[in-house]
Amino acid sequence: MRLAKVRGTVVSTVKDDSLIGVKLLLVQLIDESGDLQDDYEVAADVVGAGVGEWVLVSRGSSARQHQGYHQRPVDAAIVAIVDTVSLDSGLRYDKREDL
């Protein structure tokens, strides 16, 4: 899994039928220090994340382990909304302070 920050939504009116009803979000990956990387990815949201939140993104076949996603062409899925991230140097992220 990777840490990422939700940067926006992705809307597609023409898509594979199995993706109808799937919420797609644009996420920016976060490195081990908590800094935003230049990499972006589109991920299916299975937990109801919102723009600005830090999330955990599962990739590849693991992204299809969520109930109802086994037969969908999903390569990345948001599987958790992050509350806090702590490093040995201290607290890096706290959702309550980011609101």
Image: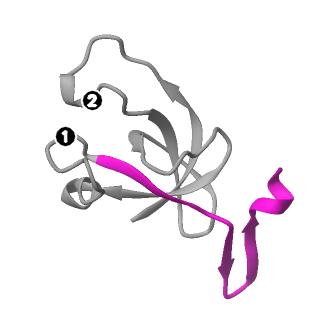
Q: Quarter-wise, where is residue 62 in the image?
A: bottom left
Question: The N terminus is located in which quarter?
Answer: bottom left
The residue wearing badge 1 is: 72
The residue positioned 53% from the left and 28% from the top of the image is 9
In the drawing, does residue 90 fall left or right of residue 78? Answer: right
The residue wearing badge 2 is: 19
In terms of sequence position, does the residue under pointer 2 or pointer 1 come before the other? 2
Q: CA distance from mark 2 to mark 1?
A: 7 Å
The residue positioned 37% from the left and 49% from the top of the image is 77
Give x and y (percent) for residue 20.
30, 25
Q: Quarter-wise, where is residue 96 in the image?
A: bottom right
**Residue type of the residue flagged with mark 1:** Arg
Q: Is residue 8 above or below residue 39?
A: above
Q: Secondary structure at mark 1?
A: loop
Give x and y (percent) for residue 72.
19, 40
- In the image, the segment drawn in magenta is 76-99
State yes or no: discs 2 and 1 in contact (Cβ < 8 Å): yes
The residue positioned 76% from the left and 66% from the top of the image is 94
Q: Is residue 92 above or below residue 22?
A: below
Of all residues, the one furthest to the bottom in this rendering is 88
Q: Main secondary structure of the magenta part?
A: strand
Of all residues, the one furthest to the left in this rendering is 71
Q: How crowded is the residue under tag 1: few (<14 C-alpha within 10 Å), some, or many (20+)?
A: some
The residue positioned 83% from the left and 50% from the top of the image is 99
